[in-house]
Image: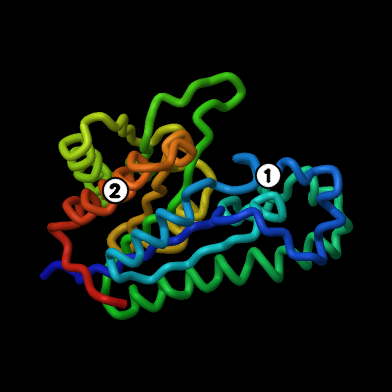
Amino acid sequence: MAKAVSLLVTCEHGGNRIPPRYRPLFRKHEALLFTHRGYDAGALTLAKQLAKALHTTLFVATTSRLLIDLNRSVGHPKLYSEATRNAPVAVRREILQAHYLPYRTQTEAHIARELAKGRRVIHISSHSFTPVLEGDVRNADIGLLYDPGRKAEAELCRRWQAALTTTAPELRVRRNYPYTGKSDGFTAFLRRRFAADGYVGVELEVNQQQVTQGGRGWRRLRAVVIETLRDALSGARPTRN
């Protein structure tokens, strides 16, 4: 008998908030907070809508990735930004303890509890990407990032891409683009913690051009993402959390 499925939605870069205690570190970096470096525009809106529509657990962070990047592993050179990496060791440790570890630990603990109940966890991590990076134009509207070596992730993303292409052929949907699913990130970390038969992690990436254009197109994209994820999951047996 197939395992029941527990869906999970997260958003690691949902906002650009800097707690008052650390604002002095950003005196020369305020402008960065409002760029793609500061947060993933639209990712929080999409994550909330996904979780509400699918009746699932949602974990989000609204502190800026420039404080500490929740989608990087400890030891990664970009865990801290230019605003925080030169802060005293005690300050960086405090940021790690207060803002990084609680988010990552609660998410990991939730997955472990669901697996202990005999369920398969399907985790959608909501992100967005800048349409142009260092002069390179990103040729996609939606990216689905996964580990090709994990069969369930590859199959889910193939089904999701097919559903998106059928439902909204005007959208450019690519797999493992604009990043690779195996590169450092929260889903990649969680794959090392949980076996492939229990944990399925997909990073959803939306082009921020879709977000900034707003209006009907942005609303339609969100609706299409939800509808097609339902289609892609239709062979699974979702359960309410």
CA gap, disc 1 and disc 2? 30 Å
Q: Residues within 10 Å of mark 1 (few under 14, many from 20)?
A: some
* Colour scheme shown: rainbow
Q: Which mark is residue 225?
A: 2
Q: Are marks 1 and 2 in contact (CB under 8 Å)?
A: no
Whether residue 180 appears in this view of the structure is no
Q: Is residue 193 above or below residue 130?
A: below
Image location (x, y in percent) of residue 42: 48, 48
Q: What is the crowding at mark 2: few (fewer than 14 residues within 10 Å), some, or many (at least 20)?
A: many
- Residue 232 visible in the displayed image: yes
- Residue 231 image offset from top left, x and y in percent: 16, 52
For marks 1 and 2, give the one nearer the viewer.
Answer: 2
Image-quadrant location for residue 174: top left
Horizontal side of residue 122 vs 80, given as left or right: left
Say which of 206 and 195 sits in front: 206
Residue pointed to by mark 1: 78
Q: Nearer the viewer, residue 124 or 26?
A: 26
- Amino acid type, mark 2: Val
What residue sits 43% from the left and 74% below the top?
110
Image quarter (top left, top right, bottom left or bottom right) of the C terminus = bottom left
- Is residue 33 left or right of 149 when viewed as pictured? right
> In the drawing, what numbered circle is on residue 166?
none
Please tell me which residue is depicted at 64% across the width and 64% down the height of the picture: 100
| x then y, percent, for residue 45 | 44, 56
Number of numbered tags placed on the structure image: 2
